[in-house]
Amino acid sequence: MDRKRGLNRAKDFSFVNPWIRYFLFFFSFVFWVFSLLIVAVGVYAKIQKATDAVRNTFLIDPAVILIVVGVVMFFITFCGCIGALRQNIRLLKTFSLSLTLVFLTQLAIAVLGFFYSEQTRDALGKFVKKAVVHYRDDLDLQNLMDHIQKEFQCCGWNNYTDWSWNLYFNCTHENPSSERCAVPYSCCAPVPGETVINTMCGFGVQTMSHLEANKSIYAAGCMDKAAMWIESHLLLVGALALGTALPQIAGIVLSHILVSQIQDEITSVL
């Protein structure tokens, strides 16, 4: 009787820990569903503005960025999800390698951004300049710029005169636009008691001095305001960075453990 029990236990024994296997499956599945939602939102946004598509804004188009991020996430999490469910070593190794590459890329960007802060600012400045230039060409880009300026209470990258980069807001005498020398309403400081937003509050502001303009708009540039925000919210920035890194590290470690256990299982059978 004891011998039979021993044989049954030997048959039931597995090197693969079901807790690790199914945790990795559900972990990957949650992010897989999330990636589908990101792709869906990106595709919907792109279809909605299909007639307004501008080639020059392709790389800074929020919809395109969402689609690319979503597709990459979908591929990685699909490998983890099916690899854990089917105990497929190749898919699990692909999942682990992809996550490792993404993690190392993020780490490299963070380190380079810290040690080469001036170059990072210049690179971000070029991105923002392109966003300013194409402000009226892409609705999503316009909404993104307006949101950033409202949240950080800033205007332009260096200061409010950066809006001369835009064709409509350009402050040269040759510009026939009715918005000449203006800035977007998102630069305007709210007036106490005002219930209706005055979208023309930034008209003619670029012709004013910094002190004069500061009375009606946020004259400071978003570069300095963003740096000040990061310095005053270091704990939050650190928590966000940790929250991004931990799931990736967990996925890498769990996939390595599961691969090792599956290989042990195969070896024991042979």
Image (tube, rainbow, N blue to C red):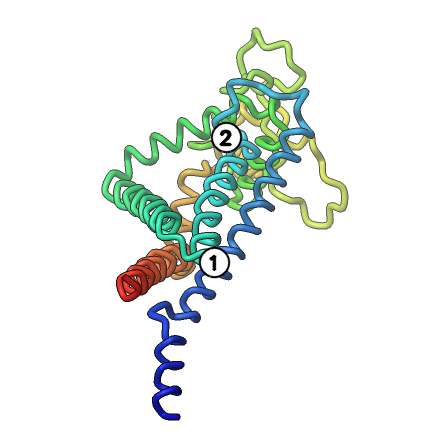
Q: Which residue is mark 1?
A: 85
Q: Position of residue 268 (x, y in %)?
A: 28, 66
Residue drawn at x 28%, y 33% as measured from the top left: 119
Residue in the foreground of this view, choosing between 104 and 139? 104
Q: Amino acid at mark 1?
A: Leu
- In percent of width and height, residue 86 lies at 45, 56
Q: Is residue 49 left or right of residue 18?
A: right
Residue 142, percent across and down?
60, 31
Q: CA distance from mark 1 to mark 2?
A: 55 Å
Give SS at disc 1.
helix
Q: Residues within 10 Å of mark 2 (few under 14, many from 20)?
A: many
Residue drawn at x 68%, y 49% as measured from the top left? 192
Instruction: Check the image and report above or below for 93 versus 139.
Output: below
Name of the residue lying farthest toward the right: 196
Q: Residue at x 52, y 56 (%)?
A: 29
Image: 54 above or below 1? above
Image quadrant occupied by the C terminus:
bottom left
Q: Which mark is residue 160?
A: 2
Residue type pointed to by label 2: Tyr
Asked whether residue 216 appears in the rendered view, the answer is no
Residue 203 higher or lower than 89, as above or below? above
168 on left or right of 101: right
Given the current orientation, which residue lies at the most extreme left position? 115
